[in-house]
Amino acid sequence: MVRRTREEIEGIKSALLEHYKGAKSELHYRDLYQLLVAVILSAQCTDKRVNQITPALFAKYPDIPSLAQADPEELKELIKSCSYFNNKAKNLIKMAQTVLHDYGGKIPTTPEELRKLPGVGRKTANVVMLEYFGHNLMAVDTHVFRVAHRLKLSDAKSPEKTEADLVEAFQGRDLAPLHQGMVLFGRYICTAKNPKCHQCFLAHLCPDQAKSGESPTSHSAAPEPPRRSDS
Ligand code: SF4
């Protein structure tokens, strides 16, 4: 449920769009294949870590056919610094095999089809679609979830319901750039621990700040979505 006035929401929206104009994912990729693999790896793992892993990974497995034939142990070795690397290795190989056998080797380009691939949940599919194709979609990762809750744009317990609240709050418009902005805002300013409230351009619209003038860590834990490998 959205708990802000229309005026407050418009203030948040325009400030995010202004500050993060043209923002893109910080994952390094050259094509749709590399983006999909990087986003799958980034679940419960930092983009920085994924960017350290992917150069060697893409050198060894440059495309869907090579990944479909990967030896699971060799793949695990390459991605072992990433969380959930056992499951991710299995899912990456199964994803590539599914694309090869069910889609003629071409990665599908609708969120519905992407979600049918092993290792690809709603968030991963939406991130790929909004980042690569600029589709008007919201995706809720750990940063977007936390920011949405701190700014009282949602009080939902799940990423799916939080996504619905954000779509409603933003009236279904500018969702892709708002997602990119919320990710960067959550990663660098409204961080889980010690948010940088003193340099926050949304402080005047933050209910926690308005209530107490204190950092929210002093009176409330950072809201986090339920942990799973697609968030
Ligand atoms: S004032 Fe602090 S808690 Fe509120 S949105 Fe800004 S960084 Fe986050």
Image (tube, rainbow, N blue to C red):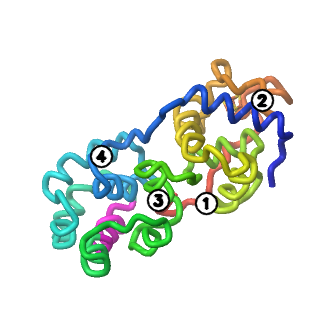
Q: Earlier in the sequence, mark 1 or mark 3?
A: 3
* The stretch drawn in magenta includes residue 57: no
Mark 2, ligand 1, within 8 Å: the answer is: yes
**Marker disc for residue 226:** 1
Circles 3 and 4: CB distance less than 8 Å?
no
Residue labelled with disc 4: 29
Position of residue 221 in the picture relative to residue 108 (left or right):
right
Q: Residue at x 14, y 51 (%)?
A: 59
Q: Nearer the viewer, residue 6 or 62?
A: 6
Query: In the image, which residues are magenta?
Result: 84-95
Q: Which of 3 and 176 is in front in this view?
A: 176
**Marker disc for residue 205:** 2
Q: Which quadrant of the figure has residue 221?
A: top right
Q: Nearer the viewer, residue 157 or 38?
A: 38
Residue labelled with disc 3: 124
**Alpha carbon distance from label 2 to label 4:** 35 Å
Circle nearer the viewer, 1 or 3: 3
**Alpha carbon distance from label 3 to label 4:** 15 Å
**Alpha carbon distance from label 1 to label 4:** 28 Å
Q: Is residue 197 visible?
A: yes
